[in-house]
């Protein structure tokens, strides 16, 4: 049977992707950002999954205001990096896992989460920047990736509680897939940042670190936090952090299993307008 | 159920909800059109003529031509869509975000390196933080 072995959490800042693509990772400004992902390279060699379910949001790239799905699972075979106005990122095409994705869609919809299914879509920095940070420069991504998009652009966006419950439904779905697969669930976006208005540039280091503490130790409590608190305390774009609760909800301890092991934790300010957070949790 | 009114009580912030999205539909869809190189070229060649092809209000068109991002936000724009105008102009996201704060590009960048804008005094309208300047509307 398929099993979830770990969850990984990271910001997905576009400027990190640009620095990566233009070979600026060793510049003074960017060096401490990329150093936060050094750990991942060795860890991933020992823990390469077969499939990653990667939770991210589209940033007015593939989804305009024409269509705004709250939750969308990508069930197609492959997904090209999108041209977001600066040319497509020079990173590999993302290869999906249509059988597992369709299975998850079917199982999760029957647990009352009404997912949109998407078979053709280009994926933006929200999906490809985490892959670059974790895997570095590669000719092909070392595993299959099922993109899973959440609307965090137009309010109301789903609550932390809804995301946490969705993660639990996804866990049940993955564990009922008959093939023996090693699956990771990633939650991306955040941490504190605001890209608009006179309050642009907001960073809340104390709040971010408390979020990390609670995400590790007491996610059920964290999931009760209302959306207004994310926007007020972590900035208008800090609301992306609700997506981390989907990955956290998929971990074993939430279903009565053992507590996860914290393999890695990292926090740095700034990358462009944003606080960078990164966490890896292993299931026991 | 209406959105919690507390969302409108955060200083220096426009929360992009269904109402803003309705007001800004064509402004944002115009921005999406700039994802295509040929549209960027047509827009740059004659901004007014290109904008007139869209069902935007005159106020929205004026705000675009003035590159007044705070005004565009107040008129229903969303930053991820408006960023396509910045990309067309060759601006980075940091330059765009900074331009909405009244700070110079250098001062904004320096603030970020120092750890960003403080939350203190910037949680609620009426406090004494540095983001209390309301967006124009």
Image (cartoon, coloured by chain):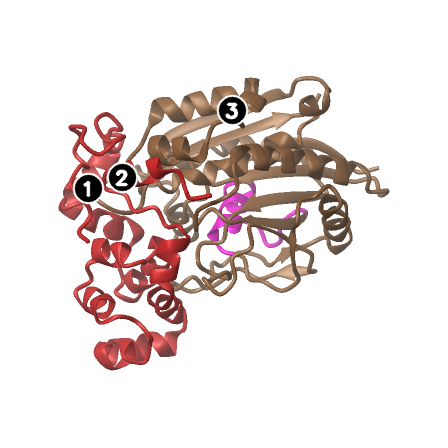
Identify the hue of chain A: brown
Asked if marks 2 and 1 touch (Cβ < 8 Å), the reply is yes
Q: Is A28 located above or below residue A17 in the figure?
A: above
Residue that carries the numbered disc 3 in the rendered image: A222
Q: Secondary structure at mark 3?
A: helix
* Residue B84, quarter of picture: bottom left
Q: Regarding mark 2 in the picture, which secondary structure is present there? A: loop
* Horizontal arrangement in the rendering, residue A242 relative to residue A4 (left or right): left
Query: Which residue appears at 43% of the width and 53% of the height?
Result: A21
Find disc 1 in the rendering and name its residue. B108
Looking at the figure, which quarter contains the C terminus of chain A?
top right
Write down the colour of chain B. red
Q: Is residue A140 left or right of residue B109?
A: right
- What is the spatial separation of the Cα atoms under label 3 and label 1, in whole angstroms? 32 Å
In which chain is the residue bearing label 3?
Answer: A
Front-lying residue, A174 or B94? A174
Of tags 3 and 1, the one toward the viewer is 3
> Quadrant location of the N terminus of chain A?
top right
């Amino acid at each position: 049977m398929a099993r979830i072995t770990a969850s990984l959490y990271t910001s997905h800042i576009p400027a990190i992707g640009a620095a990566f693509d233009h070979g600026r990772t060793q510049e003074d400004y960017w060096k401490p950002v990329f150093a936060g992902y050094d750990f991942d390279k060795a860890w991933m060699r020992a823990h390469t999954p077969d499939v990653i379910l990667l939770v991210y949001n589209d940033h007015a790239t593939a989804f305009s205001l024409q269509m705004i799905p709250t939750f969308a699972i990508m069930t197609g075979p492959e997904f090209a990096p999108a041209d977001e106005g600066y040319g497509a990122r020079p990173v590999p095409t993302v290869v999906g896992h249509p059988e597992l994705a369709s299975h998850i869609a079917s199982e999760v919809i029957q647990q009352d989460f009404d997912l949109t299914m998407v078979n053709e879509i280009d994926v933006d920095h929200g999906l490809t920047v985490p892959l670059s940070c974790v895997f570095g420069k590669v000719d092909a991504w070392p595993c299959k990736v099922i993109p899973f998009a959440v609307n965090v652009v137009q309010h109301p966006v789903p609550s932390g509680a809804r995301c946490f419950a969705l993660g639990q439904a996804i866990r049940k779905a993955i564990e009922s897939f008959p093939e023996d697969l090693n699956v990771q669930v990633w939650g991306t976006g955040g941490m504190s940042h605001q890209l608009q208005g006179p309050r642009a540039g907001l960073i809340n280091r104390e709040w971010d670190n408390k979020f990390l503490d609670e995400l590790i130790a007491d996610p059920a409590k964290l999931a009760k936090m209302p959306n207004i608190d994310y926007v007020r305390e972590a900035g208008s774009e800090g609301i992306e952090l609700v997506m981390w609760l989907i990955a956290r909800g998929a971990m074993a301890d939430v279903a009565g299993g053992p507590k996860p092991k914290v393999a890695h934790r990292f926090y740095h300010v700034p990358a462009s307008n944003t606080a960078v957070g990164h966490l890896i949790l292993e299931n026991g | 159920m209406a959105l919690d009114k507390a969302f409108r009580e955060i200083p220096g912030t426009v929360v992009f909800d269904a109402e803003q999205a309705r007001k800004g539909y064509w402004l944002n869809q115009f921005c999406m059109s700039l994802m295509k190189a040929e549209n960027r070229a047509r827009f740059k060649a004659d901004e007014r003529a290109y904008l007139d092809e869209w069902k935007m209000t005159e106020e929205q068109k004026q705000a675009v031509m003035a590159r007044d991002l705070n005004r565009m936000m107040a008129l229903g724009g969303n930053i991820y869509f408006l960023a396509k105008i910045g990309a067309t102009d060759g601006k980075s996201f940091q330059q765009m975000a900074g331009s909405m704060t009244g700070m110079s590009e250098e001062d904004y960048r320096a603030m970020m390196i120092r750890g960003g804008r403080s939350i203190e005094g910037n949680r609620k309208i009426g406090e004494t933080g540095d983001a209390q300047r309301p967006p124009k509307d």
